[in-house]
Amino acid sequence: MPSSPSVISARIRKARQSRGLTQAVLGERLRVTRGAIGHWEQGVTLPSTANLNALAAVLGVPLEWLVNGRSNPFSGPKNSLKPNDFVGVAEPKGRYNEDQEHFDKETIAVARKFFRLPKKQRKVIRNLLDQLLPN
Protein backbone atom coordinates (compact mmCIF):
# COMPACT_ATOMS: atom_id res chain seq x y z
CA MET A 1 0.00 0.00 0.00
CA PRO A 2 1.44 3.40 -0.96
CA SER A 3 2.59 5.73 1.77
CA SER A 4 0.90 8.99 2.65
CA PRO A 5 1.88 12.07 0.61
CA SER A 6 3.83 13.58 3.51
CA VAL A 7 5.99 10.45 3.84
CA ILE A 8 6.69 10.36 0.09
CA SER A 9 7.52 14.07 0.23
CA ALA A 10 10.01 13.48 3.04
CA ARG A 11 11.66 10.69 1.03
CA ILE A 12 12.02 12.93 -2.02
CA ARG A 13 13.62 15.66 0.12
CA LYS A 14 15.94 13.19 1.87
CA ALA A 15 17.14 11.67 -1.41
CA ARG A 16 17.68 15.09 -3.01
CA GLN A 17 19.60 16.43 -0.03
CA SER A 18 21.70 13.27 0.25
CA ARG A 19 22.80 13.85 -3.33
CA GLY A 20 23.68 17.46 -2.59
CA LEU A 21 21.25 18.77 -5.20
CA THR A 22 19.25 21.97 -4.96
CA GLN A 23 15.60 22.01 -5.94
CA ALA A 24 16.53 24.10 -8.99
CA VAL A 25 19.16 21.61 -10.21
CA LEU A 26 16.85 18.65 -9.66
CA GLY A 27 14.10 20.51 -11.51
CA GLU A 28 16.42 21.11 -14.47
CA ARG A 29 17.36 17.44 -14.63
CA LEU A 30 13.71 16.40 -14.52
CA ARG A 31 12.60 19.24 -16.81
CA VAL A 32 10.15 20.61 -14.25
CA THR A 33 10.18 23.87 -12.33
CA ARG A 34 11.86 24.40 -8.98
CA GLY A 35 8.40 25.18 -7.65
CA ALA A 36 7.15 21.74 -8.66
CA ILE A 37 9.99 20.15 -6.69
CA GLY A 38 9.12 22.37 -3.71
CA HIS A 39 5.46 21.33 -3.91
CA TRP A 40 6.42 17.66 -4.03
CA GLU A 41 8.68 18.07 -1.00
CA GLN A 42 6.01 19.97 0.96
CA GLY A 43 3.30 17.46 0.11
CA VAL A 44 1.20 20.06 -1.73
CA THR A 45 1.16 17.82 -4.80
CA LEU A 46 2.68 14.49 -5.71
CA PRO A 47 4.74 13.79 -8.83
CA SER A 48 3.15 11.91 -11.69
CA THR A 49 4.12 8.30 -12.28
CA ALA A 50 6.50 9.37 -15.05
CA ASN A 51 8.09 11.96 -12.76
CA LEU A 52 8.39 9.40 -9.95
CA ASN A 53 10.29 7.09 -12.32
CA ALA A 54 12.53 9.96 -13.41
CA LEU A 55 13.08 11.02 -9.77
CA ALA A 56 14.18 7.52 -8.84
CA ALA A 57 16.59 7.41 -11.78
CA VAL A 58 18.11 10.85 -11.22
CA LEU A 59 18.38 10.43 -7.46
CA GLY A 60 19.67 6.87 -7.73
CA VAL A 61 17.08 5.36 -5.40
CA PRO A 62 14.64 2.49 -5.96
CA LEU A 63 11.17 3.56 -7.09
CA GLU A 64 9.61 1.22 -4.51
CA TRP A 65 11.45 3.11 -1.76
CA LEU A 66 10.04 6.45 -2.93
CA VAL A 67 6.51 5.05 -3.02
CA ASN A 68 6.42 2.38 -0.28
CA GLY A 69 9.54 2.84 1.79
CA ARG A 70 10.81 -0.66 0.92
CA SER A 71 14.43 -1.26 -0.14
CA ASN A 72 15.70 1.72 1.83
CA PRO A 73 18.95 2.83 0.19
CA PHE A 74 19.93 4.80 3.29
CA SER A 75 19.95 1.92 5.78
CA GLY A 76 22.60 -0.72 6.21
CA PRO A 77 26.31 -0.49 5.49
CA LYS A 78 26.09 -2.15 2.08
CA ASN A 79 23.63 0.28 0.53
CA SER A 80 24.26 3.37 2.58
CA LEU A 81 24.62 6.42 0.41
CA LYS A 82 26.49 9.50 1.47
CA PRO A 83 26.60 12.87 -0.25
CA ASN A 84 30.21 12.14 -1.25
CA ASP A 85 29.15 8.97 -3.11
CA PHE A 86 27.18 10.88 -5.71
CA VAL A 87 29.11 11.47 -8.89
CA GLY A 88 26.33 13.26 -10.72
CA VAL A 89 24.64 12.74 -14.01
CA ALA A 90 27.05 12.12 -16.87
CA GLU A 91 27.29 15.26 -18.91
CA PRO A 92 29.61 15.85 -21.81
CA LYS A 93 32.63 17.96 -21.11
CA GLY A 94 32.53 21.25 -22.86
CA ARG A 95 34.02 24.66 -22.99
CA TYR A 96 31.76 27.19 -21.41
CA ASN A 97 31.31 30.78 -22.49
CA GLU A 98 33.22 30.07 -25.67
CA ASP A 99 30.33 31.16 -27.87
CA GLN A 100 29.61 34.23 -25.79
CA GLU A 101 30.10 37.45 -27.69
CA HIS A 102 32.40 40.08 -26.29
CA PHE A 103 31.41 43.71 -26.72
CA ASP A 104 33.49 46.83 -26.50
CA LYS A 105 32.79 49.51 -23.90
CA GLU A 106 30.98 51.79 -26.36
CA THR A 107 28.52 49.06 -27.37
CA ILE A 108 27.81 48.23 -23.75
CA ALA A 109 27.24 51.91 -22.91
CA VAL A 110 24.76 52.25 -25.82
CA ALA A 111 22.94 49.09 -24.74
CA ARG A 112 22.61 50.44 -21.19
CA LYS A 113 21.13 53.68 -22.48
CA PHE A 114 18.76 51.75 -24.73
CA PHE A 115 17.43 49.61 -21.89
CA ARG A 116 16.92 52.67 -19.69
CA LEU A 117 14.44 54.04 -22.22
CA PRO A 118 10.72 53.44 -21.76
CA LYS A 119 9.29 50.47 -23.63
CA LYS A 120 7.53 52.64 -26.25
CA GLN A 121 10.73 54.49 -27.15
CA ARG A 122 12.67 51.22 -27.43
CA LYS A 123 10.03 49.96 -29.84
CA VAL A 124 10.40 53.09 -31.98
CA ILE A 125 14.17 52.59 -32.13
CA ARG A 126 13.80 48.90 -33.04
CA ASN A 127 11.36 49.79 -35.83
CA LEU A 128 13.77 52.45 -37.11
CA LEU A 129 16.63 49.94 -37.11
CA ASP A 130 14.48 47.42 -38.98
CA GLN A 131 13.83 50.02 -41.69
CA LEU A 132 17.48 51.08 -41.92
CA LEU A 133 18.91 47.55 -41.79
CA PRO A 134 16.55 45.15 -43.58
CA ASN A 135 17.28 41.44 -43.28
Image (spheres, rainbow, N blue to C red):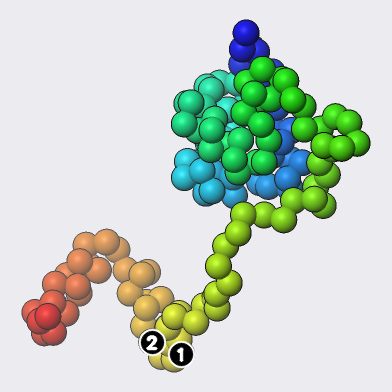
Q: Residue at x 60, y 59 (%)?
A: 90
Discs 2, 1 touching: Cβ within 8 Å: yes
The quadrant holding residue 6 is top right
**Badge 1 element:** helix
Which residue is under mark 1? Answer: 105
Q: Is residue 10 visible?
A: no
| CA distance for labels 2 and 1 | 6 Å
On screen, 8 above or below 99? above
Residue 19 in the image: x percent, y percent? 73, 45
Of 58 and 124, the residue lying toward us: 58
Relative to residue 103, is residue 68 drawn left or right? right
Residue 104 in the image: x percent, y percent? 44, 91
Which residue is under mark 2? Answer: 107
Kind of residue sitting beneath label 2: Thr
Q: Residue at x 85, y 29 (%)?
A: 75
The quadrant holding residue 114 is bottom left
Q: Residue furthest front?
A: 78
Q: Looking at the rendered structure, which numbered label has been put on residue 48?
A: none
Kind of residue sitting beneath label 1: Lys
Q: Badge 2: how crowded within 10 Å, few (<14), some, or many (20+)?
A: few
Q: Is residue 32 visible?
A: yes
**Badge 2 element:** helix
